[in-house]
Image (cartoon, rainbow, N blue to C red):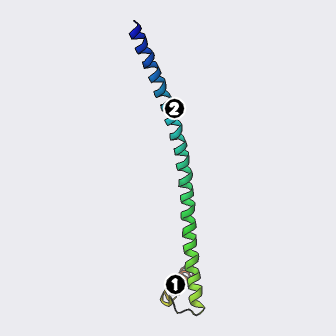
Amino acid sequence: MNGKTSGISLLESRIIVLLNKLKDNHLNLKTLKERNVLLEKEKMEMEVQVKSLKEENKSLKIANNLLGSNEGKTQTKAKINSLIKEVDYCISQLTEMN
């Protein structure tokens, strides 16, 4: 009987250790999921910021070209042509409505 009792006690202690590890793993998983959510949110904010900065950079390059810089003249001309086409389209839409 003594051998069975010590075996059961050993089994109980191992089960307690495993349950504690399971609890720790569950807490770690919860913490990691929360961190992942925060990092995803931060990533999205950074992507928006990068997009905004790229647009600002593009606008600054165009403004620089309009002020006489020789770099990117074709880009500036293409942008101006695109804007003219948009204005023409808007005008044609307005004249069709009348």
N-terminal-most mark, 2 or 1: 2
Residue 93 visible to the viewer: yes
Residue named by callout 1: 79
Quarter of the C terminus within the rendering: bottom right
Q: Nearer the viewer, residue 52 or 17?
A: 17
Left or right relative to 59: residue 10:
left
Q: Which of pointers 2 and 1 indicates the residue nearer the eye?
A: 2
Q: Label 2's element?
A: helix
Circles 2 and 1: CB distance less than 8 Å? no
| Crowd around label 2: few <14 · some 14–19 · many ≥20 (10 Å) | few
Q: Nearer the viewer, residue 81 or 38?
A: 38
Residue 55 against residue 38 in the figure, above or below: below
- What type is the residue that disc 1 sits on? Lys
| Residue at x 56%, y 55% (from the top left corner) | 41
x, y (%) of residue 19?
48, 27
Residue 11 falls in which quadrant of the image?
A: top left
Residue 25 against residue 53 in the figure, above or below: above
Residue named by callout 2: 23
x, y (%) of residue 69?
56, 92
x, y (%) of residue 37?
54, 49
